[in-house]
Amino acid sequence: MKQRYYITTPIYYVNGAPHLGHAYTSTAADVMARFKRLDGYDVFFLTGTDEHGQKVESAARAAGIDPQTFTDQVAADFIDMAKRMNISNDDFIRTTEPRHKRACQALWLRLVASGAIYLGKYEGWYAVRDEAFYDEDELIIAADGSKKAPSGAPVEWVIEPSYFFKLSKFQEPLLAFYEENPGFIAPPAKRNEILNFVRGGLNDLSVSRTSFTWGVPVPGDPDHVMYVWLDALTNYLTATGYPDAVGARTDFWPANIHLVGKEIIRFHAVYWPAFLMAAGLPLPSRVYSHGWWTVEGEKMSKSLGNFIDVRPLIEEFGLDPVRFFLLREVPFGGDGDFSRKALISRLNVELANDLGNLGQRTLSFIAKNAGAAVPPLGRLAEADETMLQSAAVLPDKVRDALDRLAFNEALEEIWRLVRNANAYIDHQAPWALKKTDPKRMATVLRVLLESIRSVGILLQPFMPETMAKLLDQLGIAAEDRDWAALAAPMTAGAALPAPFGIFPRYVEVAA
Ligand code: MSP
């Protein structure tokens, strides 16, 4: 039986349109999901939208529409973005769906039954933008003297009846869990941040609100709606069919990995495991926090109006160059800057020059000079052995990097082979061998084809559309494109279709 792999993105707030930040998490998760499928896993990849809470309710009010109609519209836009980015999610969860309300209420009742929830009164700070409660000592003083959340979000003083979750009781169990599962929080810097936070002591957490109604009603007390983060985190269970014990996806819980942006690690690495412990449910294996993008050096913000929608970028540069750029430019976990200049440079240098050229010159040479078929492999020279050997060890290197979410390292490994193959073709000069040693020419071309095939197969998770085109040109059948297929060589004599370029150079047109 295939091993299971369950990966999630955060579910995105529908208070505003999808942007580069959302596209980033989704693309990273998509690469992992595609990689695991090609590596023989049974994958469940979940994304979706977080549609309740005060922030979404006020965005709907500002738009002059009722919250359900509003969330329907914005959720449709997120679904559209996922399609345009070629995100291969197996499900798209919306927290306003009945299945989700049912899951939230079932989890709530389980928390009540375990004695983890009690009724009290919340009096303290709340930041609607973060949908988060803050202690006085966490606040910062802004330039204008006002108190702000650590994220810079405005805070308001809230006094209302509230149910509480006994988070304080979970300090020790959480610390023991982090100790026993050192890989639970990644990267390591984030792990330290969370350890320090938990070691500092945990207050009980307010988990219901009474000052608005846009949420999942608390079972038995409909004056309260559930705190949006308890509601939102439960999505990861809902999609597996919770609370049903049997079903198509119940075996996918616990998740292998939750991908999250760095600003929401605390919810996933502290609150979520505590809720699950209290409910007696298994904990996910890993929460991985990635960094944030700025745009042309500036933070994306409403006031600057510089939110980047990836869809116009896809129109202009093509989808796969955008996907490639997002994972190539910045080590996952760190922050990065998006700029047109950097995107164009990656596209022209690494995609068009390095990879595009390698494919194009090899394939068009074979089409013209080697009978448009896979050439036979003759006696191997040392340079050939070296090339074939580096192609043979590449899948393990890429697998190792991807298992660490080191997307840029995986790409660097692949590009090392691409550059070596370009150097090899220059050095071996098949155009000269054509007259002097046609057998040797065939061997050189075959070594190149095998290398390009490895690159094409291993790059599929990153650039599925373009790599499909490349593999078509190599005559590789659909069922021979997974990682296991790399072990067998190509078939000499197999006919190759007419080649065409896959990455046109981008030439900036003067405005
Ligand atoms: N709804 C919550 C998550 C609930 S999960 C149970 C939420 N939503 S969000 O719409 O704000 O999206 C958060 C995600 O978008 C972040 O985790 C991060 O992945 C991504 N990003 C938003 N802005 C970003 C950048 N500027 N750069 C990179 N990613 C960022 O939080």
Image (cartoon, rainbow, N blue to C red):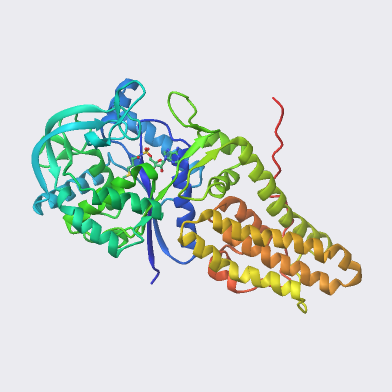
Residue closer to the observer: 179 or 22: 179
Q: Residue at x 18, y 28 (%)?
A: 158
Position above or below: 336 against 466: above
Residue at the bottom extreme?
379
Residue closer to the observer: 381 or 149: 149
Position of residue 70 in the picture relative to residue 433 (left or right) = left
Q: Which percent across, then down, holds residue 272?
A: 26, 50
Residue closer to the observer: 346 or 371: 346
Q: In the rendered view of the protein, which quadrant contains the N terminus? A: bottom left
Q: In the rendered view of the protein, which quadrant contains the C terminus? A: top right
Ligand 1 shows up in the quarter that is top left
Q: How many marks?
A: 0
Position above or below: 372 against 201: below
Q: Which percent across, then down, holds residue 199?
A: 24, 52
> Would you identify the image quadrant in which residue 18 lies?
top left
Residue at the right extreme?
435
Position of residue 416 in the picture relative to residue 18 (left or right) = right
Residue 241 visible in this rendered orientation of the protein: yes
Q: Which percent across, then down, holds residue 153?
A: 33, 30
Position above or below: 308 against 400: above
Residue 476 visible in this rendered orientation of the protein: no
> Would you identify the image quadrant in which residue 382 lies?
bottom right
Q: Which percent across, then down, holds residue 333?
A: 45, 49
Q: Residue at x 56, y 53 (%)?
A: 464
Q: Residue at x 80, y 70 (%)?
A: 442
Residue closer to the observer: 21 or 64: 21
Position of residue 457 in the picture relative to residue 155 (left or right) = right
